[in-house]
Amino acid sequence: MNYITQLYDLAKQYRENAYAPYSRFKVGAAIRCGHFFCGGCNVENISYPCGICAEAGAIAALATAGYTNIDEIMIVADTENIIPCGSCLQKISEFGTPDTIIYSADLNGNISTYKLSDLLPHNFNASEVKNA
Ligand code: THU
């Protein structure tokens, strides 16, 4: 089974549903946890800071389905090499490991591959929270 193709197709499909009337920049994301796949798209808001990224939507779908592990995540946008924002990298780190794979793809199927640790070498983690 080619997980990359499945993740790409799913993220590209979810991107179509992006609600991005303000930036006009549609993003789709898909997550694999074992054999489970889910995803999300960016959902903007007229109160701009209320908008959510595609990765955040995908992570919400993951948790909603009862899963708490990201094996791989694919981000698709109409640009050469989209890198998740810092906030989303922190969100990915909550459910991933430094070795979690992050794929970045454009609409033509060009895919770049990163590890979470490439993009977020250090995160804020539970050891820094006394009550966690
Ligand atoms: N966006 C994402 O959904 N994911 C990213 O990795 C980067 C940016 C969204 C947020 C906003 O709706 C639009 O792209 C432009 O920043």
Image: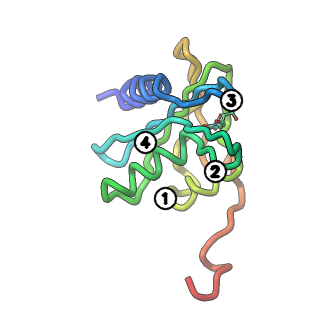
The three-letter amino acid code for the residue at tag 1 is: Phe
Instruction: Give yes or no for contact between labels 2 and 4 (Cβ–Cβ under 8 Å).
Output: no
User: Nearest the camera: 2 or 65?
Assistant: 65
The x, y position of residue 70, in whole percent, is 44, 51
Q: Is residue 3 above or below residue 120?
A: above
Q: Position of residue 72 (x, y in %)?
A: 46, 43
Q: Amino acid at mark 4?
A: Ile
Q: Secondary structure at mark 2?
A: helix
Question: Callout 2, which amino acid?
Answer: Leu
Q: Does label 1 or label 2 sit earlier along the sequence? A: 2
3 or 4: tag closer to the N-terminus: 3
Point out the residue furthest to the top here.
108
Residue 13 pos. (x, y %):
42, 23
> Is disc 4 surrounded by few (<14), some (14 to 19) or many (20+) residues within 10 Å?
many
Looking at the rendered structure, the secondary structure element under dot 4 is strand
Going from the N terminus, do you reach mark 3 or mark 1 first? 3
Query: Residue 95: which disc?
Result: 1
Which mark, residue 7? Answer: none
Q: Position of residue 79 (x, y in %)?
A: 67, 20
Q: Earlier in the sequence, mark 4 or mark 1?
A: 4
Query: On the rendered structure, is 87 left or right of 55?
Result: right
Q: Which residue is mark 2?
A: 89
Q: Residue at x 34, y 27 (%)?
A: 2
Report the residue at 34% width, 57% height from top.
Answer: 67
**Front residue (pair 40, 100):** 40
Q: Quadrant of ligand 1?
A: top right
Q: Disc 3, ligand 1: is the CB inside 8 Å?
A: yes
**Mark number for residue 31?**
4
Task: Determine the CA span between mark 3 and mark 2.
Answer: 23 Å
**Distance between mark 4 and mark 1 Cα atoms:** 11 Å
Tag 3: Cα neighbours inside 10 Å, few (<14), some, or many (≥20)? few
Q: Which numbered disc flags the more N-terminal residue, 2 or 4?
A: 4
